[in-house]
Every structure is written in C-alpha cells, then in structure tokens.
Image (cartoon, helix red, strand yellow):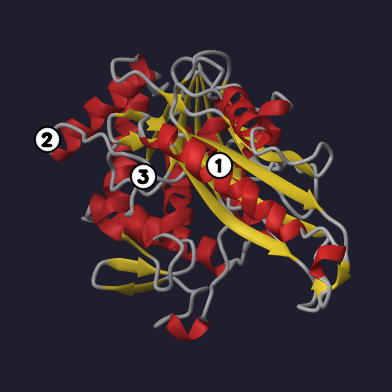
Amino acid sequence: MTDPAALLAETLHGLLAELIAIPSVTPPGDTQAVCAAAARHLEAAGCAVSMPMRTPPIANLVARLGEGSPCVVFNSHIDTVATGDRAAWRTDPFAATMEGGRIYGLGANNCKGSAAVHLWLASEAARRGGPARGSLVFVLAGDEERLGPEGTAYLREEGLIAPDALVLGAPTENQLIVQERGILWLEIETAGRAAHGGDPPAGDNAILRMMRLLERLRTELGPRLAARRSGEKVSTMNIGTIHGGENPNVVPDRCIARIDRRLLPNEPVEAAAAEMEAVLAGAGEPAGSYAVRRPVGTDGFSAPLDGPFVSALAAAIEEHQGRPAAVLNALAASDGRFFARDGIEIVNFGPGDGAVSHAANEFVPLAEMVDAALILRAFVERTLGFAR
C-alpha cells in the first residue's frame, strides 16, 4: 500500500521542480511560461482558469472553484529575484536539487514552495468536489519582487479577485504573520546649476542640496520614528540610494535619492508622506530647487487573531503540530498590503524560513511543504468545507 505522506511529498516535489525549472526572474519579470505551466495542472483538475496580463511579459494566473461568498483567496507570487553570483550556488539554481530533506533552487523558499502547495491544494479541493459553500480562488502573481503594480495590485484594481480572506504563501515555517508594516518609497530630486569643477562657487551643487535635505530628515524625523513602536514592530526610514553628478570636474546640477519608509499598521501612508514633506520643507531650500515623488505607497495591515479565518488557520496549525501557532514579526512586505483598507482578514502562511530568501543556495524543507499542504486542507475544511 502506498504511504499517503510519501505520495504527497513526491507530488509536491514534482510540482516545485517544474516551477523552479522555468525562469521567472525580475527583471524582466517574465512570468508567462511559469503561469502557463501551472494553468495546465489547474485546468486538468477542473478549475476555471484565466491568465490576466496588463503589461507583458508580467502574467498572473487566477483559478476558481465554487461561487460567491465567503471567498478565500490563496495567493503566492511566482516571480523571483536574480540568481546573483552563480559561483556562490552549490547546485543549479534552475533545478530542484534534494539534499538532506531540503529542496534547493531559485525561488524554492520565496515563494515557489508555497505556489506548489497551493497547486496541490487546488487539485485536492477539485477532487473533493470544490467548496461546500462559497468559493476558493488560487492566484499566482507576478511583479511582487519589485513591489510593482502589475501583479496582485492589478488583479484587485480590476475586480478579478475580491477576497473575504487572503492567505498569502510566504516562508513562515508554517506559522502565522497577521501584521505587516506599510511601505512608502519617497524619491527626492534636487536641482542645481552646473559649472566647472575648478570654480565651484559659480555653480549650485545639487548633491550638497541633497545632503542638507537628507540631514534634515535624519535629525528631525529620525528620533520621532525611533519612538514609534507596536509590539516588536518599529517605524523606520532607510536612505537606500543616492545618484548624482556625471564627472568630478563638473558641479552637479541634479541628484536623486530614494528612501524606504516602513510604517506601523496605524500610520496611514498619506500622513507619513505629508510628514516627510513637511520636514523637508523645514530645511529652508529655495522653492523649486527640489521635487518629491512617491513611486510606492501602501498601508500596513493587522488582522484580528480571533477573526473566523485567522482563528481557523491557527486551529488547523495547532491540530497538526500539537502546539499553538506562533505569531511572527514580519520584516518584509507582501502583496497583502494592497488589501489593507478593504476590511478583510489577511494572513501570511507557508513553508520555509524567510532568513534564507534572496540568497544563494535558497531551499525549502520538503517536510514543511507536506505539513503546509495538510494544514491548508484542514483550514479549507474548517471554513468552507468540501462538497464531498
């Protein structure tokens, strides 16, 4: 007799190997081939499948079972970061290599391991007749790694997904993340006047103007943020990039800096941006000498632990693991932020450890994938049930 756990492990390994073998690196973020491969599995299982795409080559996959509310959406992003230094990889990053119970490969941990689990769950739910009530939706999203608008954000904007509960596949070691900080990316561009480097006073140095503005942010805003906390979460600001000038012998007339602000769930993105802009205005630079843009801005979210969906997932974890589910502190951000104002339950859950994401020799433990699959099946049974 075939061991069900061994069969499940073999199935998950095969699904993950197929996903890893298809490059979906950002940039360029081409997810068409990997979504098409996943679509074949889901169509064969009996799901209604579509591949929405606003801006090629960034494709998304949406598969549905059942109709109406409550709607539970399982979302896993399918794009990856680049391989980085190939010499740092002990194995082929585009092959699922099993060593010591771990599956190595680019995206194995973040987040193709969760994507493989969701593909199995969709097939299992279809095999059992779909949900007894409401609907199940499975999403493989692109454009997540650059925090872009062409993946989950696009699906929400177009009304292609409208969850009552959103379960995001993420490396949480099969525990829960129910709070995330919001993200604000601020871009500051300073203007100056070019001149010969041998006569600096004849020009107006845009880099020096940027230095004054950034120092104002550091001294005025920095202490405020350090005092803002919510449990383990801290409000932060990071000056991530500065680009200015073309040659040492020219006074630069342009400089651009990009800043990452992480916002507590109770800090609205609009208020955070206005606060930063007010601090910059206090630096005393001439009107029109700098401009501020917001390429990214989304609120954080906080889901109640006693909500019907989060509590059902916590109960499924405890039942399977024999101990209460742990609630983790998130440093990174997920696509859940696009639904922060929608009044729904949002939770991150999946196999793998976030600490090994975006690094050479990325891996996911196969045993954790098996556990994740069984926990999520129990979660669906608790919330929507199966038709048979």
Position of the C terminus by quadrant:
top left
Q: Position of residue 253 (x, y in %)?
A: 83, 60
Q: Residue at x 33, y 27 (%)?
A: 230
Q: Compare marks 3 and 1 and give the one earlier in the sequence.
A: 1
In depth, the one of 48 and 111 nearer the eye is 111
Amino acid on which disc 1 is placed = Leu
Residue 49 in sight from this viewpoint: no
Q: Compare marks 2 and 1 and give the one earlier in the sequence.
A: 1
Q: Which residue is mark 2?
A: 323
Per the model, the C-alpha gap separating discs 2 and 1 is 45 Å
Amino acid on which disc 2 is placed = Arg
User: Relative to 366, does residue 336 appear above or below in the rendering?
Assistant: above
User: Seen in the image, is 189 located left or right of residue 121?
Assistant: right
Query: Which residue, as the protein is rendered here, is positioned at the far bottom?
Result: 87
Q: Report helix, strand or loop for mark 1.
A: helix
Q: Nearer the viewer, mark 2 or mark 1?
A: 1
Q: Nearer the viewer, mark 3 or mark 1?
A: 1
Q: Which residue is mark 1?
A: 217
Q: Residue at x 12, y 35 (%)?
A: 323
Q: Report helix, strand or loop for mark 3.
A: loop
Q: Position of residue 321 (x, y in %)?
A: 16, 39
Circle 1 crowding by C-alpha within 10 Å: few under 14, some 14–19, many from 20: many
Residue 232 in sight from this viewpoint: yes
Asked if marks 2 and 1 touch (Cβ < 8 Å), the reply is no
Residue 350 — which label? 3
Q: Residue at x 56, y 48 (%)?
A: 215
Per the model, the C-alpha gap separating discs 3 and 2 is 17 Å
Position of the N terminus by quadrant:
bottom left
